[in-house]
Image (cartoon, helix red, strand yellow):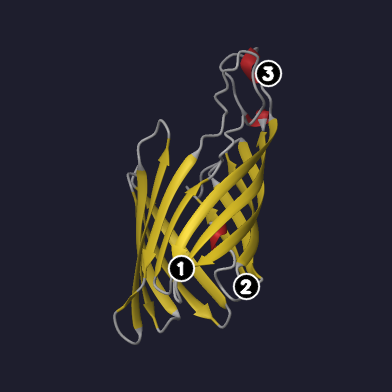
Amino acid sequence: LNPAVAGSKDYLSASLSVRSQWTGLEGAPKTQFFSMHSKFGEKMGIGGYVFNDETGPVSERGIQLSYAYHLSLSDKSKLSFSVAGMMFFHDINRAVLRAEEADDNTLNTMLVKGVSPDINFWMMYYNEKLKIGLSSPQLLQNNIYGEKANGNNSNKLSRHYYLFSEYEFNVSDKVDIVPSALFKYVQGSPMNFDFNVRGVLNKKYWIGASYRYNNAISAMIGFNYKALSFGYAYDYAMT
């Protein structure tokens, strides 16, 4: 999802992810996304992704196209800058909502569809073992369903700030340990973070765990087959 990654590899990379939360509950969150990126020329990269997210009566779809430029700092390290344009499509299925009062004016007059363009900025320093990235999506902070007459719109998209890091430790010729961390901040909300670690055997098989602050712990497993990589993760909610 980080557009600054586009062009960091010498091959075309594609990824498909499907996530289901609270399995078995009606209206439980479901998310799917597909991304792709490739090197373009010697110092540039292009990429994009599409996603679909559904939670109860609310659904959101989006598409992002990105451009990245990679600046060489040394023979083994580079600094990547990326700008991405994004379009959000928001929908609320009013038919599944149940108001306490049948003539609820707010429910009957609420907008149920919205379109929001946005811009994301990303930068990343990387070499063979280390990655450090800084990003800020939703820079425009648009209103999802348009501006209300009084200018007070609680559906305004908030600007996010992400800090990401990853390092690969070569324990032996066959075993690598890859810890990573993601820090997230949104104005008006407390700092949030994820810690992850993976153990990789022969660059092919991997197993790992993740901790999401005050939210969940996860177990992960996967393997690589030729040009393909497969993975599965299971979350245990702590809230």
Alpha carbon separation for disc pair 3 and 2: 55 Å
Provide residue 170's location: percent of width, then percent of height: 32, 79
Alpha carbon separation for disc pair 1 and 2: 14 Å
The residue shown at (56%, 39%) is 139
Horizontally, residue 219 falls left or right of residue 89, namely: left
Which numbered tag is attached to residue 160? none
Task: Give the amino acid at mark 1.
Answer: Leu
- Looking at the rendered image, the disc whose residue lies closer to the viewer, 1 or 3, is 1
- The mark nearer the N terminus, 1 or 2, is 2
Residue that numbered label 1 is attached to: 73
Alpha carbon separation for disc pair 1 and 3: 58 Å
Residue 24 visible (yes or no): yes
Mark 2 lies on a secondary structure that is loop
Residue that numbered label 2 is attached to: 42
Mark 3 lies on a secondary structure that is helix
Mark 3 crowdedness (10 Å alpha carbons): few <14, some 14-19, many ≥20: few
Between 2 and 221, the residue placed more toward the observer is 2
The residue shown at (61%, 35%) is 57
The residue shown at (44%, 62%) is 125
Q: Is residue 24 above or below residue 16?
A: above
In the picture, the quarter occupied by the C terminus is: top left
Residue extending farthest to the front is 73
Mark 1–mark 2 CB contact (< 8 Å): no
- The mark nearer the N terminus, 3 or 2, is 2
Task: Give the amino acid at mark 2.
Answer: Glu
Which numbered tag is attached to residue 108? 3
In the picture, the quarter occupied by the N terminus is: bottom right
